Amino acid sequence: MTRGFSQRGFGRLTRREHTVPRLNTAALPDLIFTVLFFFMIVTHMRDVKLRVHYDVPNGTQLEKLIRKSAVSFIYIGPPARELQSQLGTAPRIQLNDKIATVEQIAAFIKEEREHMSPEDQERMTVSIKADRSTPMGMVNDVKNALRRSGALVINYSSRPSAKEQP
């Protein structure tokens, strides 16, 4: 018998027909929903609508925040264009979704701590995302209000300077 041929019937040699088996797609919907579920779990959606514009300054010695569950954000900058007719162009402070004053920072920190686990309360970090044109006096006022409220770990957001970027 020759390879690739088979004997059929009365000694007659015929070529075997090779067909590619069809792809089983029965598990495809399960796979798609598993991947969709994975991305729904790990994707972080922005939950704060920015009401101020901030262009972070360049930094030279940068570190990434590791535990984002213990981080609260304070945004400082001029109001967004749609709010400038109501609030003017002077820099404002945004806590969560509200424009606030320096006096409201202590209540904000207290409320943020209540939503955290006890381990995160000990490691609470406040990240200040200030516009590069914000007066340093305003940043110092925010920093002093944080100090009075017991939030002593402060992070200043910035981006790498042009020299450090690969």
Image: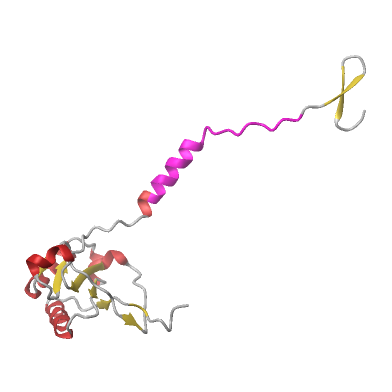
Q: Nearer the viewer, residue 132 or 40?
A: 132
- How far across and down, in percent of the image, does residue 50 sit? 21, 63
The quarter of the picture where residue 65 lies is: bottom left
The quarter of the picture where residue 36 lies is: top left
Q: In this view, does 73 lie above or below 135?
A: above
Q: Nearer the viewer, residue 141 or 147?
A: 141
- How far across and down, in percent of the image, does residue 13 sit? 90, 22
**Magenta-span inclusion, residue 31:** yes
Q: In this view, does 69 lie above or below 162?
A: above
Residue in the image at 91% along x and 14% along y:
10
Q: Nearer the viewer, residue 161 or 153?
A: 161
The quarter of the picture where residue 43 lies is: bottom left
- How far across and down, in percent of the image, does residue 56 sit? 28, 76
Residue in the image at 67% along x and 31% along y:
21
Residue in the image at 12% along x and 81% along y:
141
Residue that extends furthest to the top in the rendered view of this protein:
10
Specify how the rendered protein is coloured: secondary structure
- How far across and down, in percent of the image, does residue 8 sit? 86, 18
**Magenta-span inclusion, residue 162:** no
Q: Is residue 8 above or below residue 20?
A: above
Residue range corresponding to the magenta coloring: 18-39
Q: Is residue 43 left or right of residue 110?
A: right
Residue in the image at 23% along x and 65% along y:
118
Q: Is residue 19 left or right of residue 115?
A: right
Counting the numbered discs, the total is 0
Q: In this view, does 12 lie to the left or right of 43?
A: right
Query: Quick one: quadrant of the N terminus?
Result: top right
